[in-house]
Image (spheres, rainbow, N blue to C red):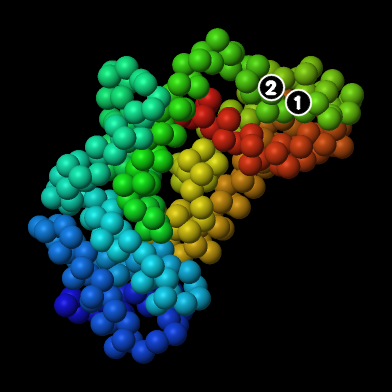
Amino acid sequence: MSPGLAQAFVAAREGALVGEPLATLEERLGRGLSTARAAWPGVDLDGARFATHLARHLPADSPAEALEALHVADLYLACACAEGLPLAHAAFEARVLPEVHVAVARLKLPPSSVDEVRQLVRQKMLVPGPETPARLAAYPGTGPLSGWVRAAALWIALDLRRQRSNQDVSMEDSTLSLLVDPGDDPELVYLKTTYRAEFNTAITQALANLSPRERNTLRLKYLDGLSIDQLGALYGVHRATAARWVVAAQQALLEETRRLLTERLRLTGSQLDSVLRLISSQIDVSLSRLLRSRID
């Protein structure tokens, strides 16, 4: 058994109590680690690192019971892949990546498109970005890894098909649709239609002016649909920290949009506030579309 499993687990939870003696937790984690290593022979992930990874995927209350319900062996492989272990990557390629073909079979895609989806899944799952870890770090372990990968592959395939069927939609009109709502009062419709180029430019520039972590946080939350718990696991931070990052990124985007619009437009304070309140209220919907069209 790797030493210090319980200590690493508790430390990752920022000292939160786990509801059972450390010796019992150590034994429970040791059994999980042994089971996981047996499932993936040769994939030798550090035990304390795995305990830390597990801790970030469990709820604050009753972590011991939740641990028993997790797909621990799959979490082990996902963590090892995110850590860049070559044998873990090989195991993922051989035993999990074929799920892509299962997921997209009913879509009757041409072989070239299936290969493209497979490559995109491989890249998203295994390759870290400039500011983000490999996506497998966010796998929650609540269901089989094969099912999680199938869901990701299907989402990617459908997204590719949507993008290719909408290539004739202009960027400007797409961005304007984020701002104009059928329920707007006439003044707002006039403002947003009249100044649509300025709104388009301001929001796009505001996104570009965010820090890399702010952009990636918004992208992962609103474009890829990661939960706060998954964001925390992906970055290796507590869920409360991840939640603060999301709120701060949203606020930075809105404040920067306001600053840019104030510089460029001669609107009254109430007019500008009305538009920004609408953008803020629709942020869940609009960010996913705007990030896709502007940053992806």
Relative to 54, say whether 222 is above or below: above
As rendered, which of 171 and 226 lies closer to the eye? 226
In the visual, does 153 lie left or right of 263?
left
State the residue at coordinates (36%, 46%): 147
Q: Quadrant of the N terminus?
A: bottom left
As rendered, which of 141 and 204 lies closer to the eye? 141
Q: Residues within 10 Å of mark 2 (few under 14, many from 20)?
A: some
The residue carrying mark 2 is 176
Q: Which mark is residue 156?
A: none
In the visual, does 266 lie left or right of 233?
right
As rendered, which of 70 and 178 lies closer to the eye? 70
SS assignment at label 2: helix
Q: Amino acid at mark 1?
A: Val
Q: Residue furthest front?
A: 106
Relative to 220, say whether 233 is above or below: below
State the residue at coordinates (46%, 53%): 231
Q: Which mark is residue 180?
A: 1
Relative to 219, say whether 159 is above or below: above
- Residue 230: x, y in percent? 45, 55
Q: Residues within 10 Å of mark 1 (few under 14, many from 20)?
A: some
Q: Residue furthest top?
A: 168
Quarter of the view holding residue 279: top right
As rendered, which of 159 and 100 lies closer to the eye? 100
Separation of marks 1 and 2 at Cα, in angstroms:
6 Å
SS assignment at label 1: loop
Q: Amino acid at mark 2?
A: Leu
State the residue at coordinates (89%, 28%): 185
Asked if one can make out residue 241 in the rendered structure from this viewpoint, the answer is yes
Disc 1, disc 2: CB below 8 Å?
yes
- Residue 33: x, y in percent? 22, 70
Relative to 262, say whether 217 is above or below: below
